[in-house]
Amino acid sequence: MAVSGNRVAAVPARSRRIVSTGIVPMGLDEITAEWLSGALSRRQPGVQVSSVRMGEPVHGTGTNVKLSLEYDRPPEDGPGLPDSMWLKAGFEPHFESLAISGLYQNEALFYDQLAPRVAISVPRCFYAGADRVSRQGVIVLEDLAAAGADFGRATRPLTADGAAVVLEALAGFHASTWGCTWMSRLDFVTPGIPTAGPGASYFLEHTPDVFRTWIRERPDANTPESVNDPERIVRAFWALAEISCREPACLIHSDAHLDNVYFLPDGTPGYLDWGSPRVSSWAWDVNYFLVSALEIEECRRCEQDLLRHYLDRLRSHDVDSPGFDEAWLAYRQWNAYGLFVKIVNPDYFKPREINVAWMSRHVAAAEDLETFRSLGV
C-alpha cells in the first residue's frame, strides 16, 4: 500500500529482462531532485526541488518510499506543494511477473486519466507516469498519514457500522458508472477476469498443486475440510471468470479489501492501490471488502443486513439495483475470487499475519456461503 507504512520482506533479487526506455524511472537511484523538479512541474509548472531525502523503502507488490522535499522555487500558480509525499513504483525483484499484467502502468494511467472522474476519495496525485513498453508506472501521492488519515488493516477488523460507511462509499462509486460504456474505450481498464493473454497469466500459473502447498503451509488459517479441495477452488475461480462480464457492470476497484481503505479525519473513507481498475460486477468489490473487513462471526451475523444496506444506497443514487435474492447469489459467487487470490498471496506481498487473516475469512466464507455450489462446481 502506498502510504500506510506497512512493511514486508522483499524477495531475493534477480536480473530483469525488461529494459528501461528512459520514460519513467526503473530504480530508486533515479529519484533525484532534478527528476522530481521535472516530474512535479507537469502539474505544477515552475517548481524546482532543491533536495530530496528518502525514507526506508516499503516493499510489497510495489515499492513505496516517503519523500521529504525542499524547494528552491514554488509552483508558478495553483496550490502549493507539501514537504512530504509518497512515491510508488515497480522497483521490486518480482517486477516482471506483475508488470506483464499491467499492474504498475495501469495505476499510473488511472491517476492520470480516471482519478478526476471517479466518485470516491482517492489520494491527491502530484505525478503519474507510465511506460507502455517496459510496463513501468510511477506515481507520487499525498502523504495521507501527515493529513491525519487512518489506514485499514486486516488485523484490526471493522465493526458492522464501520463496514456500512465503506459500503456507502462503494455504492456511490459503483452508481456513478452503472451501465456506462465509456470505460471500455480505456485500454487499461480490463473487462472482468481475463481468461487468456497476459492478464490471465498470474491466475493460470496457480494450479491445484500450488493451492495444496499454501493450505498446508498455513494451518492457522483453519481451512474447513469442505473447502480444502484445490481442484474445486480452481474450477470455481474459472467458472466465476466466465460470468465476470455479465450485466449490469460498472467500474470497480477489484482489490477493495480493508487494507486498501483509508479514513480521513472526518471519517470519509477512500481507496488506495488502483492498479487493476475493471469493468465488472459490483459484487466483486462488495464481497472482497466485507469478507476481508469483518471477523468471521461478525460477518456471519450481519453480512445480509450490510448487503441490503449497500443495495439501498445504490437505489438512493437512482440505480436500478438487483433484488436481494439475485444480489445474494452474486455475493456468494464472488467469494470464489477472494478464496483464490488470498490463499496464494505470498508473504513478500503482505506480512504473514495479514495473509492468514484474509485467508481464514475467505475459506470460512466459502463454507458458509456454499461458494462452490453457487457456481455449480
Image (tube, grey):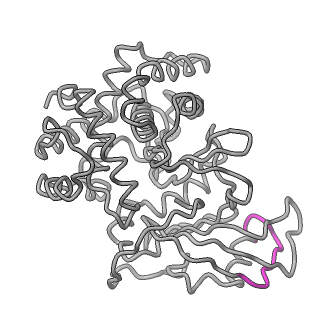
- Nearest the viewer among 187 and 165 is 165
Residue located at (44% from left, 23% from top): 302
- Nearest the viewer among 178 and 290 is 290
What is the quadrant of residue 72 in the picture?
A: bottom right
Task: Pinpoint residue 83: horizontal percent, then vertical percent.
Answer: 78, 70
Q: Is residue 18 left or right of residue 44?
A: left
Q: Is residue 116 left or right of residue 232?
A: right
Task: Pinpoint residue 218: horizontal percent, then vertical percent.
Answer: 24, 55
Question: How many discs appear?
Answer: 0
Residue located at (26% from left, 51% from top): 220
Magenta residues, start to end: 41-52
Q: Is residue 39 left or right of residue 184?
A: right
Residue 171 visible, this angle = no
* Above or below for 184 versus 331: below
Task: Pinpoint residue 334: horizontal percent, then vertical percent.
Answer: 32, 34
- Nearest the viewer among 37 and 347 is 347
Residue 302 visible, this angle = yes
Quarter of the C terminus within the rendering: top left
Residue located at (71% from left, 81% from top): 52
* Above or below for 41 versus 143: below
Task: Pinpoint residue 328: horizontal percent, then vertical percent.
Answer: 35, 20
